[in-house]
Structure formats: structure tokens, C-alpha cells
Amino acid sequence: MINFYQLLEKDPAVLALNNNVEKINGLTETEETLVLATSFHQQQETKIVVKGNMYTAQQLYYRLYPLLKDDVLLFTMEESLRVEAVAASPSMYANQMEVLTTLCLDEKPKIIITHPMAIIRYLPKKETFEKQILNLSINQKYNMNDLKNDLIKSGYKQTARIDQPLTFSLRGGVIDVFSIKDEKPIRIEFFDDEIDSIRYFDISTQRTIKQIKSCKIVPASLLIFDESFAPFEQRVKTQLERDRKKAINYSTLKENVERDISYLKKNIFEHYLYRYQCFKENTASLLDYVKHKQVIISTYDDIRANLDLILDENYEYIGELYNNNAGLNYYSIFDDFDRVVEKHKPYYIKSSFASLDGIKSKVKMTYFPLLPLDKVVEEIVRLSKRNKIILSINKTQRELLESAFDYGKYNLDDYVQFTDVELFEGFNYEEIMVLTAKELFGVKIVKGRYENKFKDAVVLESYTDLKIGDYVVHNQHGIGRYEGIVTKEIQNKYRDYLQIRYKDDDLLLVPLEQFKLVRKFLAAEGVGVRLNKLGSKSWERSKQRIQAEVNDIAERLVNLYSAREENIGHAFSKDDENTRKFEANFPYQLTEDQEKAIAEIKYDMEQPRPMDRLLCGDVGFGKTEVAMVAAFKAVKDLKQVAYLCPTTILSLQHYNTFLDRFRDFPVKIKLLNRYVVASQQRQIIKELKEGKIDILIGTHRIISDDVEFADLGLLIIDEEQRFGVQAKEKIKEYKKSIDVLSLSATPIPRTLQMSLVGVMSLSQLDTAPQDRMPIQTYVVEKNDSLIREVISRELARNGQVFYLYNNVSNIYNVARKISVMIPNATVAVGHGKMNREEIEDVMYRFINKEFSILICTTIIETGIDIPNVNTIIIEDADRFGLAQLYQIRGRVGRSNKIAYAYLMYHSNKQLSETATKRLQAIKEFTELGSGYKIAMRDLTIRGAGDLLGERQAGFINTIGMSLYLEMLNKAINKQKGIVEEEIEEAKNKVSEIDGYIPGKFVSEDIEKLEIYQKLAIINTEKDLINYNKELTDYYGKLPAAIGNLFEKKNLELMLNTDRIASYDEYEKENRIALTQEYSSSIDGVKFFEKISKISNEIKLRYIKGQIILVFEKKKNYMDRIAKVLEVINDL
């Protein structure tokens, strides 16, 4: 295995850097990566590399990570105070804490990649940061309330339940905290004022993973204080007094500044408060955190050019705040870059054009033409005669290359060596040539690494996240509004109830044990909901009417499936060597979902009946690769393939994708859409009829009457629901005789998938490709300065921008305004009232980078893939549904750049309650956040409607998704002749135990629901004991009222066995009747003996072959019942 550090140990640039002499001349990205890594490996001294801006710092980090792994750190800080104030990135903030923690606790040398704004920002001094690290251990004296206050002082935010880093939760005698230092959150349990136990727990199950003896909890904010607050406050007030004379409205300014100070005093560390950091006495820079290090400036010219612009923008923002009475007229919020770095004797790397006499690296860029696989083999063999060839490729790519070498009668290992390091691109060094997937296969590595500390963050979906104010459906009473859980004393017993409000203010209390009768009302967003009237028959009539329709669609689905099973189609042959070669040619790792879908499709294609399968998956989840595998299988059997796309642009994109994917195979692929001139169209149609074309990709043009296939074997349809009636009728005809694979970006609910097993063939891709970059999503008030800054930032990295404005009447005014705001930008407009050809021409030119900004309506919601667009601004975001916002946001984030989505609303607008909730959900719009889950829920409702038809979608909106799918499932099973076994509810219920969940112990309704839900499904004593342990682990010692719920459940488990016929509770006594079979089989003498030992007050009767036990309601009668049940179950 090659060692890159030995390879470059004598490189002039490495030696110059090691000796801190002579400036190195500008390095390419690959040269810089290799030189820095080699120098670090040789010297084993910390290096802090300052790049021109945040973006170039990130790129260098991604390149270094494969070489150095955890020895390289990235420290970035937001370059714009304006962006930070309104749209701070939680993951970036967590990363800052992680790097500073590492520098405080880990003395091993590191390479830290950063940028100027992160260098000139004021940070807490290293001693301050270290002092705030909490060291906890078992048996340590520590008051629980003191720990809570210390966590708040350190910047932790209190939540009901831990769902992400830098938060803590408190309940009973337990504090959960998620420190950035640890991969897993920590649970600390107290006994009085002593730490009783410390343990890691799993964020998704909330269960303990491992007991530990001690832990460190590191700060969660950079705004922490080590000095007395009074001097800091006085310095701020002194500046406030200086601003009195020039302030436009001093009283408003004073009010805003005093509010900010009060936040800091209460340890509310909002991101916009960073601008007060400069008023602290004890501050430091990142460079001060490492004593022995080499500071490398790469390059000073780049830094100065970027930094002056960034500082000007920030000072402009400070001025705006002051003019709007929102901030102090104080500009010393950053340190001076030159002053900061010169203290640490930096090493300067020159820019590429600075000088011809600087030190240069011997690393050279490699040239390797993009060739078919058989030619790649020949080229490697040729080059190996005068070069030592080293390959940096993954396992899949290696197997592909080995197969190609074997085919050419060569042994790959005779010509090359391998490295485990996954480099971005190849290079030459003297007689060494390093080749990567980029040179060999034309594949770019998306990035070196994206470690998201929020990757385990989970919003638990217990009982579908039911919140107060949500609509719910009761099986018997219909739709009401959920008002929360109440504990009430009824008939001298305290119990928990779901409180539901119906029409005319009627109130229904549902015992929590009966939660299964109630479910959340799920319908498409924006659907008007009417409450039902308690006691009215309208709900029952609605259910009966919909049941009839559901029965009808179930019958049609089953009949259609049966008819399709009888149709005769082509049974495709099994996989052969060519298939394996084609699949190995895919340079990325397939997800498990992709592998499963491919296996399902192949199985269908190999059957003698026509395939009709629907493949659902989010944009970017890999549907096209699955479709291409199916297409190859068809072409291998000399059958033709048609790929039907809803738009011209999409057909062009898929055409280019297919050409690239099939380039090593003798497959003829053609495109048919309006961009193809008439003469070429005629030629394509002629060749298609003659069987000379294998795959035809295009719009609805490819299913026109004049287009004839010689032997069509597979039709692939992208987004079938987007085609018109005529196209759909044509598709229906095709489905009778040829294999059809339909693709959809709209997911289908899991419950619907289960219902349709054996009625419809469905595959779903739920897993995102590995290391997919998240989209940084911000919810902000509309602000022209922010818009200008955001767009300028994207254009500076040669990207493009979507600006979504969904009002056609004013869209051209917005376009003119953006053109004036950013004069160097080229702006285009696209909206739904343009004719189809106009829209497609605009999109085509935008894809080809003729425009840098597209001002558009929701026409971009689905389909198109433009990797160069990585910023989207959505104006009036509060007007869109979450599902729609999710799909619109998915237009960006398809490349190796971090993508940004800014969801804007107008500051002077009174938002409705619904819009406010929606925006709150959007703020949690990470892939694992609740906003994502709500969007997914709404999308699945839309998916169900697309699949079952508009009429059924209407029914879903009438009675809610859950109840509709339950009815559909039963109707389909009935049509298939499947007899459903009704799950019997426990018939013997105990109602005389005072069991409930105290609000002081569990304050969140959702958690109470979850406890009842889990208790309900337990059916063994062992599971009950384990669940008791689980709750004790989570909450600490359980109060008696919750203990009673477990006692009640335990009694019900013992009462509902095949030995007990009935259990009845009367006013003065309770009775247990044993079954005749058990009564006749037991040893009566032994049984009576055991019962009399428990109590002589238990009466026994023998009636019609059954033993009846009677318990008078005297003191401790329930204890006697429990002991008798143990005897019954033990005998």
C-alpha cells in the first residue's frame, strides 16, 4: 500500500514549509492538500491554515479529511452578521463548540482549517471556556437545580425531550444532556443532592446504552461569561450614552439594547447577540487556543480581497441597525486581521501569479482522457511501462476494473498498486502517476466528509405528534378538536382522559386506555375541517357512503390485478455476465432500498405476465439508476425501451444520463422531443420501426400514433400523474402487453403499501444516498440587504440562484428590482402563464448558465435537476404548504456544494396561527426534524391521492387518512377472500385501581399518550417488567400513581388467560369465574388450601361446573385478588 507522506518527503514545497523559510509559490488544490498533509505528518505540530473565505476553507477540509481523518478540523464562523442574526446554522454552531472543546481537551497536534472572519471574531478566552467545562462523576455532591442552572449558564437550551445536541431536559430525578463532546446524549440520575448514576442513552429509543463513571459537559455557547456581569453591562451602557445625541429615536434604541442585555443576563444566548462580545474584557482569537503551532496564510491576496468586502457589508449592517434604533453605533466588533496573525509569526503562501521565483511543488496535474472501459485497460497498460501507477478508487470501482482487465486477458495487480485514501483527483509526482475515479470513470467524489452532529437527532413520532388544537377522529363520534389530557376524579377514582371538543361546544372525555378509538385527523394541507355534532347520525352516514366507494375501488383494484395476472407478456432472461458488468459500472454504492427495488423489478420482468410496478422515491434517491438497470435487462433480450418524460427539459436530462451510463455498451439511444428537428425526427421514427434503436427517450411525442416500435419490451414512465387523459389512455393500452415501470417522486404511505400487497406492485426508496449534503434552511423576515448578500455570495462561488415569487402579475417588477440590486447578475423570468415552449426555452438556457438568477413561480417544484443552483430564496414562504416547500427546497443541494434555502415572510404581516405553526415547523426542517416529517406526511397523503384517484383523495380529506386506509385495507382483504382475525380487546378489565400519570412527573401530553400506548400492547408479564425498568431508566423512581397503572395492567394480564371465564366488579363485591375446563381439572383440596391461606374472607361457590371466587370490598381486597390470580396461574 502506497504511503503518500514518503512519496513527497523531499518535495521542495514540503521542505520550505517545514523549515518556515522562503515563500511557496501558489499551489493548486491538489498540491496544497498533499503538501500540507505531508508536512503535518513529518512535523507532528499543529498547523492553522487560513484560507480566503469560508467556502475555500470547506473545500480544503474535504480534500484533507481522507488523508488525515480526525487529525484535521474545520472551524468556520458565519461571515455575515446579518445572516447570523436571522438565520444561524445550528450545525455550524455545534461544530465551533466541538473544535474549541478538542483544542482544550486534546493535546494531540491537528490541522485546523479556517478563514479570516473566524480569525478576527472575538471568542471567550481558552481559560474561560475550560472553566465552563463541567466534570461530573458518580457519588459527587451536586444539587440537581444547580446543575440545571449551570447548563443554562453554559448556553444549553431546555427542551421537553432531548432531540438534538446542545439541549437538556429535566424530569423527576433525572437530567438528560446532549454535549457536543459525546456521540450520544448523557442521562444523569440524582438521589437527593448526589449523582447516583451517569449513562449514555440512545436518542431514538431513549433507552440506556452504557453506564459510565464520569463525564465532561462542555459549553454550548461562545457568549459565556467568566467575569462579573456588571462591568460588561456598564461598558454597553457607556456606549449607549455616547449614542444618545445622534440616535434617531433614543428611547427605542435604549429599549432594544436593554432587552438584549436582559437576555444575556438571563443566559439567553441568541445568535444575533454576538455583536456584544466585543464589550467583554477577556476575549481571545482562535489562534490563542493553541500554544505551539504554525499559522499558514493561503493566500494573503485572496484573504485581503475577500475580507475587505465582507467587512464593508458587516459595517453597513451595523449602520442599518443603528439607524433603525436596533443596535449601537459601535464598529469595533471584530479584531484586526493583520494584528491578530502577526502576533503568531505566520507563514505566507503566495498567490499563483505573485512571483516566478518562489518555491514550487513537484506535484503535477495528471492528464488521462475519458475512455470506454476496454480502452481504459489499454491506456493503463501503456502508461505502466514508464510510470508507477497508483489507483485511488473504491471497492465497486476496483471490481469493475478487475473484470475489465480479466476480459482483456490482463491481471490488474501486475500493472497497478492501490491506496485506501480516496482522493478527489489524480496527480503526477516524478515517475509516479496517481489515478482516481475522476480520471478513470468521469466520476467526481461529492465531498471528502460531512459529519453532522445532528445526524442522530430524532423527533419521536409517538402517536403521530398529537398537539393541542389538532383535529382528531373518534370511530363512533367523528371529527373533534383535541384539547389535551386531563386527570379527573370520577366515581372516587382518578383517571387520565383525552378531552375532545365537538360542534356546539360539546365535550367528550375518552379514558386514555381507549386511545385506539381516537386517531389524528390527517388530510391534505389547506382542507377545511368541520366538527361533527355529538349524538348526530351524519358521521355514521359519511362513513357508510365512503365505505361503499372504498368497497368499489377495492373490487376494481383486485379485478385489475387478476386480469393482469392472466395477460401474456415476455419473460425476460436471467442476469448474465453483461448484466453484472453493467451493474458494476455504476461507480457509487447502491442503497439497500435500491438493491431491493432492483431485485423486485427483475423478478417481475422474468415472469411470463407483463410487469406493472410503481417505484416511488424522493428526488435524488436514485430512481433513475434503478430504471437504467431495468432498461439494460430489456435491451439485453433484444427488446426496445421507451422512457416517457413529462417535460422536454427532463427528457433531455435523462437522455444525457443514459448516454453517459451506457457509453461502454453497444446500445443505441435516441431522443425525441420538440428540440429535435423534423428531419431528424423522421429518421429516428424510421430507425425505431426497423429495430435499429434500442432506447428511445422523450416526451408524450414517443407515444404518438406515428411512432411505431419494432419490438417494445419495456415502458418507463416518469411522473405518470402529470400526463393528460389521452396519454394516460395510451399508457393503459401498453400495460396490457408490455412491462411498465412507473416512477414517482411522491411517496406512498406505509400503511397503503401494506394494504396493496398482492393488488399492486410497489417499490419505495426511502434512504438518501450516503453522505448526502443537507440543505441549510433559514426562516427569515424579508430583507433586501440580506437578499443582495445571499445572492452575491452564491454568484461569488460561480453558482446560480432560484428566486421564487409566486405572483405572476408582479413577477417582472421583482426581476427588475433584483437586476438593479445586483447589477452584475443576468436575470431571467419563468412562470406558469408562459406557454410551454417559452418556459422550456428559459429553463434550457438557465441550465446552460446563460442566466445566473431565475425569478420563477412554482413551476420549479418537481423534476428538473440543475446541480449548479445551490441557493433558493422563497418569498412569502408562509403561503406554501410544508409538503410543497419541501419539494421546492429539493431543487437545490444536488452537487458537492453546501446548499442554502431562505424562506422569507414579510415583517409587517400578521401571520395566521396556521402559518406561524408552519414556519415554526420549517425552522426544524433538517432531514430528521419534525418539519421534514410533517412534509413527508402531507406528501404521502398527496401520493395516496395520486395513486387512488382524485375521488378517493376527496374521501381521505373527509374522514382522515388513518381511518380511510383502515377501511381500504379491510375492503381489499375481503375482496381477496382473506378472513381477518379481529384482535380481541382484553375482556376482563380492572377499573377500581386509582392509576394515572401525575402532571408534575410527566408534563407533556405526548409522553403520557406514549406510556398508555405502550402499556396497551404489552401482553406478557416479562414485557411489563421490562417496560417498568425502561420508564424508571427514563424518569427515575416512578410515583405510586404510575405504579398503580402497572399493577392494573398486571392484574389484567392474569385475568385474561384461558383459565378465567370472567371478572366482574359490583357495588359490594368482585367475582372471578374460572372456566369449566379448568374448574374440573384442578386439585380442589389443594386449591382451597392455598386460597384459605391468603384469606378466610374469600368465598368460593360452585355453579354449573364453574368455581366462582367472591371478594367482599373490604380493606386490601385488590391485594387478595392479585394473590389469588397468582395461585390460579401457578397451579
Image (spheres, rainbow, N blue to C red):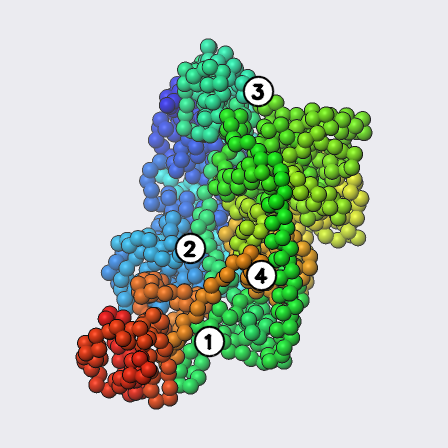
Question: Residue 965 sits in which quadrant?
Answer: bottom right
Residue assigned mark 3:
371
* Mark 3 or mark 2, earlier in chain: 2
Looking at this view, is 919 or 934 the one in front? 934
The local crowd at label 3, few if under 14, some if 14 to 19, many if 20 or more residues have their Cα within 10 Å, is some
- Against 580, is 905 above or below? below
* Mark 1 or mark 4, earlier in chain: 1
- Against 332, is 233 above or below? below
Q: What's the mark number on residue 204? A: 2
Whether the residues at callouts 1 and 4 have beta carbons within 8 Å, the answer is: no
Q: What's the mark number on residue 511? A: 1
Q: Position of residue 419 (x, y in %)?
A: 41, 25
Q: Tell me how far mark 4 sits from mark 3, CA to CA.
A: 56 Å
Looking at this view, is 957 or 618 the one in front? 957
Question: Residue 345 sits in which quadrant?
Answer: top left
Residue that appears at 69% across and 57% down: 950
- Whether residue 969 is visible to the viewer of this picture, yes or no, is no
Q: Secondary structure at mark 1?
A: strand
Residue assigned mark 4:
971
